[in-house]
Amino acid sequence: MIDTLGALDLLKNGIRPQSVAALMATVVIAGMTAVVGTANAGGEWGEPSEGGREIQAGGLVIVKPKYEGSSEYEVIGVPLVAPGSGTGDGKVSFKGIDDLRFRLLDASGFEAGPLVGYRFGREDDDARRLLGLGDVDGGLIVGGYAGYRFGALMPFVSYHYQVTGDETGGIARLGVEAKMPLRPGLLVTATAGTTWADEDYMQSYFGITPLQSATSVALLAPFDADAGFKDVFLGLSASVPVADRWSLKLTGRYTHLIGDAADSPIVESESQFMGGLGLTYRFDIGR
């Protein structure tokens, strides 16, 4: 298992402790919710082991932009607790930090359910051009998703709304997912889509009010960011068994900002990359 706290100590210069603390709490709570959910999964996450069910636990190291639109990156470490087989075909699936899905409806290829997650905030010392604009606090995400699966493909839509921290509104993702089982235990998932954001989100993360302009150290002009499509994205993830009960988790995403998001004076780079590497150990409970 990855020593998450050790990784945090080694990489602390690029990490905001308050954001990590909130994120870690959210991931642990969400993961434990997922564990509880497997009690009714009926083998959806793989057949129960003899005398109990399987749980995977470990850690993830994630590289991400310091803020949405940043050209600089930071590293964070988070724990991970999830149902055991991790194939993503069960009632609980982890799609990202802001997208832990619970499949409650499954009928003739159509599936839907709620989701939870965490939205990263922003601090005005993340970049010189942000100085004087104030912080944007991240928080807990709630929402839902729906999709229709035929074969390996599933077009989907998901909605993510922040309910704690600052009122940064909601986003909707529209995309398609393709699952490619390459061999037993090895699943690769590719995703492509676009993201629409409401006015609260756009103004919080990309807009500049007249007051913020007046206090901006970089002398940024006021900018009105309207609701609309803010990005297109491509993602790839894989779960790779490396030894008995040990699995390597790999994830990556490229996002290209568009529209008012790309035009914002806050944005340093329209191209945004995110990558994650983790290791989990699968063990039995309920014996």
Image: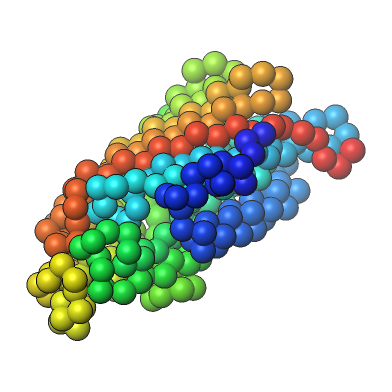
Residue name at image x 34 percent, y 46 percent: 73
Horizontal side of residue 223 vs 38, given as left or right: left
In the displayed structure, does residue 22 sit left or right of residue 257?
Answer: right
State how many labels appear: 0
Residue 205 or residue 93, whichever sits in front:
205
* Residue 86 vertical placement versus 261 (above, below): above
| Residue positioned 62% across, 36% down in the render | 2
Query: Whole-percent x and y of residue 174?
Result: 31, 50
Of residues 11 and 122, which is closer to you in this image? 11
Pick out the residue farthest to the bottom.
211
Answer left or right for 200 relative to 110. left
Q: Is residue 213 visible?
A: yes
- Residue 241 image point, x, y percent: 60, 22
Is residue 95 something one can see in this rendering? no
The one of 21 and 181 positioned closer to us in this rendering: 21
Q: Residue at x 46, y 58 (%)?
A: 16
Residue at (19%, 83%) from the top-left corner?
211
- Where residue 143 sits: x, y (%)? 47, 63
